[in-house]
Amino acid sequence: MSGALRIALVGSGSMGRNHARVIATGPRTELAAVIDPHEESGRAVADQYGSAWQPDLDGIGGFDAVVVAAATEAHHDIAAQVIDAGRPLLVEKPLCPSLEQSEDLVRASEAAGTPLMCGFLERFNPAVMTAMRMIDEPVYVRAQRHSPYAPRIKTGVAWDLLVHDVDLVVRAFGEQQPESFDVSVGQFHPSSVPGAEDVVEAGVRFTGGGIASVSASRLGQVKVRSMVIQELDRMIEIDLLRRGLTSYRHSSIEPDDDFVGFRQFTEIEVPEIGGAEPLVSQLAHFVELVEGRVDVDAERASILPAHRVVDEVLRTR
């Protein structure tokens, strides 16, 4: 494909504005249209980047690709129309707020032969990418994702927040399938939609023996985005907000005939983390997917494992 990829963006909310910025300034992409039924916000984003605004998906087949950053509840209907039009598609996570709807879109994409990608943004966090290259045989992973309350988000934290870390945990354990769950769920905020949980604590055991603990809350007063990966002889600590990583190895010197007692010490390694903004790297990956340089089937297959785990977590509560 020659020239810039003409991308239509659906949704001009907070995440949509970030996508608009990255698409409009990308070296291989053009923000061809901003689609939002709310003219004030949609046109404002379009005008900011010299793009066109339209209120609906009319003519969606005329674009090279589509990015969906609309409200989660609208993902299925929007994505289904885009797939029906035969356009490559990137949908913000989660793909849909239910496993059934997500599976439906994956099947539709496969049948249509159109590329489909889910916006698991943390996959492109430089600290996460470095950690995934470092780990060999993890035995325990702990992840926390806490945020202040956001009334605009109607889905519960399992689909809104937990799905990010579940995706990373599943990838850390080599796409193993979980065999058991221990889940606690709480809904506390008076503004939350009935059934939309505010806190989830889940313990997961995988078939290979590894275990994970994932925690999501929208009742925090500060943002927390952290992950700890433990192997038998190393611990990797990731600060996903600051994109930092620290590796620890504990050692000891046992006593011998010439030395009474023992000494302990910890080797600390702080790799230098480079790389682009995650959203920029994600868009570059999507462009390569559209252009055929990323395996379409493998990308599609990587979507559902995290959605299946979140679905099981909510069933177990």
Image (tube, rainbow, N blue to C red):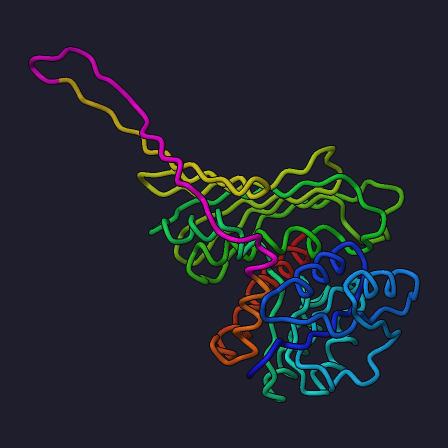
Q: Pick whichever, 237 or 202, lies toward us.
A: 237
Quarter of the view holding residue 271: top left
Residue 160 occupies which quadrant of the picture? Answer: bottom right
Q: Is residue 212 left or right of residue 182?
A: left
Work out which residue is located at the far top of the displayed protein and give it: 260
Q: Which residues are magenta?
A: 256-281
Residue drawn at (74%, 70%), measured in percent from left and top? Answer: 9
Q: Position of residue 177 (x, y in %)?
A: 48, 62
Magenta-drawn stretch contains 71:
no
Eyeballing the image, is 206 above or below 42?
A: above
Q: Residue at x 38, y 53 (%)?
A: 133
- The residue at 32%/26% (across/down) is 266
Instruction: Let me know if residue 280 is in the magenta part.
Output: yes
Q: Residue at x 27, y 28 (%)?
A: 251
Q: Quadrant of the N terminus?
A: bottom right
Work out which residue is located at the far left of the displayed protein and give it: 257
x and y percent of residue 189 in the render? 84, 41
Q: Position of residue 117 (x, y in %)?
A: 60, 71
Q: Seen in the image, is 149 located left or right of residue 27? A: right
Residue 148 lies, in percent from the top left, at 76, 39
On the image, which quarter does residue 16 sit in?
A: bottom right
Horizontally, residue 95 falls left or right of residue 236, namely: right
Report the number of discs: 0
